[in-house]
Image (cartoon, grey):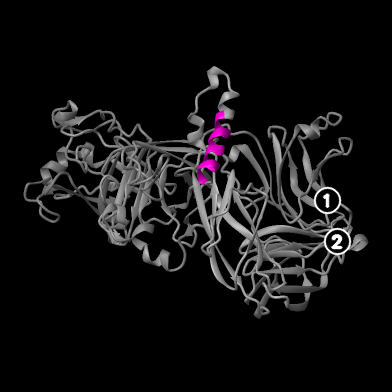
Amino acid sequence: MKILKHTLRLCLLVMVFYGCTEDDASTSFVDEFKAPTNISANVVVTQDNTGLVTITPLGEGVSSFEINFGDGSEVSEGIEPGYGINHTYEEGTYEASIIGYGLNGASATALQTIDVSFQAPENLEVTIENDAALSKTVNVTATADSAIFYEVTFGEDDSADPISANIGETVSYTYQDVGTYTITVVAMGAAIETTSYTEEFEVTAILQPLNSAPAQPARAESDVISIFSAAYNDVEGSDYFPDWGQGGCCGSGWALFNLNGDDMLQYSNLSYQGNQFADPIDVSQMEYIHLDIWTADVLQSVDVFLISATESNGERAVTVDLTPNEWTSVSIPISEFTDQDGFDVTDIHQLKYEGTPSSEGTAFIDNIYFYRAATQQLSIAGTWRVAAEDGSFAVGPAVGDTSWYSCEGECVAARACYFDDAYVFGADGSFTNILGSESWIEPWQGGEDNCGAPVAPHDGSGSATYTFDSESGALTLNGVGAFIGLPKANNQGELPNVAVPESITYTATLSDNNNTMNVYIEAGEGVFWQFKLVKDGVQDSPIIGTWQMAAEAGSLAVGPHVGDTSWYSCDDGCVVDRACYFDDTYVFGADGSFANVLGTETWIEPWQGGDDTCGAPVAPHDGSIPATYSYDIGSGTLTIMGEGSYIGLPKATNQGELPDVDVPGSITYTATLSDNNNTMHVNVETGTGVFWQYKLVKN
């Protein structure tokens, strides 16, 4: 019988092929068929002490099913999707195997426990609860001994058939209206007698959002005019609740609603309400107005008005239809307003929101802003780290779904060596993983899911670059071993199942004034690793300001270890001779920028084409290339990012001394502050046991 069934599947494929033209006769598409998924069965037993059970197999991507009943009888013949099969059991407990076959012969199996007892179900336990996310939706779960399935009558419509499920599974039902209903659960087995449970249950509605509005993309300040949004800088002086007489006449109300620290505007019993600007705004250079609106199931739509300060120009409206119980995100083209009788948008002083039906529903509104397509690329230059918080790195079947795994609680505490890893994006396009002495090492790297020494090539030792398109969000790292979030996740799949790639492309979205970056990568079909990174804040860094080499003997030196300057030390005469060097400045900006300011002359060594004398600065060590920096005061790590940027001497790099090595994209120093943060001792090891050492003072 199995041979016949598999032959039928083969015949089906042959018929498909035969119907193709010669040009399309390739059979390679068969290899693309997926194995069946979500195999299960619905099991129903007659209540007559006969043991007659109806099994209806379920699954996705299935062309036919077989059932091994688990009682020693023959395996069933092929069952088409949508059909069931009857089987008579003796009293007992059985493990049935549900086998689903795909068109290419691939199969998947699920086990189903079938408990056939001629005793009435016992120990019936029923859980009834309002769904935490779906309004007016009730979930029922029932368990019982000697039961195979149960039926639920929800008490809203007496003519409706009961809903059934296997014992232990959950049944959901959405009511039309809130209220108290009689819910009855009947547990059934093979016995004639059943066992029931009844409860008077209050069905409730969700009247406010449970989640924040979608995160907004990063935009250049010149490309957005924000009225109310945490993602951008709002125009000052707006009145979000001007009343306009609607409280007294129509029972409308308004408040600032806070959801886990996220503020949004709440307009209750909305007739019409809106926003009054401190001064008229010219939005003619913008292309859209954006709003996120949440409502329950009362409001059907909101008319959004732009109102001109010029009375003769008046106001124009566009209707936004709402989806109940979820955020409706809308970007309305400004042209939809200006196309109405030549409406002028150069002096908008109010926004108005008018609800339908009037004065009945509540609207929550967030992210109100005007914007246009990006006119400039946004920069991610700076130092970033995975946020040390619950859910900051996770994986799931879709972006936003982290149901498979999410690092939370003890995971965050245990992985401190991971959360201090830095991802450094240089203004010159360089990229560096700075992992320190320890990072989180997984078994495929030779670790034991614990902190350990970084493992090559994912240890930051290789050179890398990056490109970022802020419009599309495409963020590409170029360099073997360079990564964001987890080294194993790449575009081909997960290491070690694929080769280490030379580049990885992520999708990145900036928010929070470009200080938060949400990154995801699809590491194999339907496998989405997701990371939340935050930018190191340098606003309060003690090294912000302008520094110079201390014009004193010993401030520039080299030796076999830190504190030993026996190989060379710039003495008093050297200091006088190098006046053009000691007036060079090293400028650390509050925005994370760094600059070498050398003036018209600095000290030029022979490898630069000079004669150990003062001379014009030589590129790329002339301060002409933009650079950034990061400083970790705890570890003393100071990284300068930007080709040609340096502290002390341009020739001293982490790889060795120029010109014997390539000019690097970044240099990492060790810096120690003293004298109330006005003195900085810096050193860099340029090859094993070669320590250049500098003393700088703040201007």
Check residue 252 in the rendering and tell me which mark sits there, or answer none: 2
| Residue 13 counted in the magenta span | yes
Residue under numbered circle 1? 300
Asked if 116 appears above or below 616 in the picture, the reply is: below
The magenta region covers 2-14
Q: Quadrant of residue 40?
A: bottom right
Mark 1 surroundings: few (<14), some (14-19) or many (≥20) residues within 10 A: some
Asked if 650 appears above or below 438 in the picture, the reply is: above
Residue type highlighted by circle 1: Gln
| Residue 600 counted in the magenta span | no
Q: Nearer the viewer, residue 512 or 28?
A: 28
User: Is residue 45 visible in this depiction of the protein?
Assistant: yes
In the structure shown, which secondary structural element does the residue marked by tag 1 occupy?
Answer: loop
Q: Residue at x 16, y 43 (%)?
A: 575
Asked if 360 appears above or below 511 in the picture, the reply is: below
Report x, y in % for residue 224. 63, 40
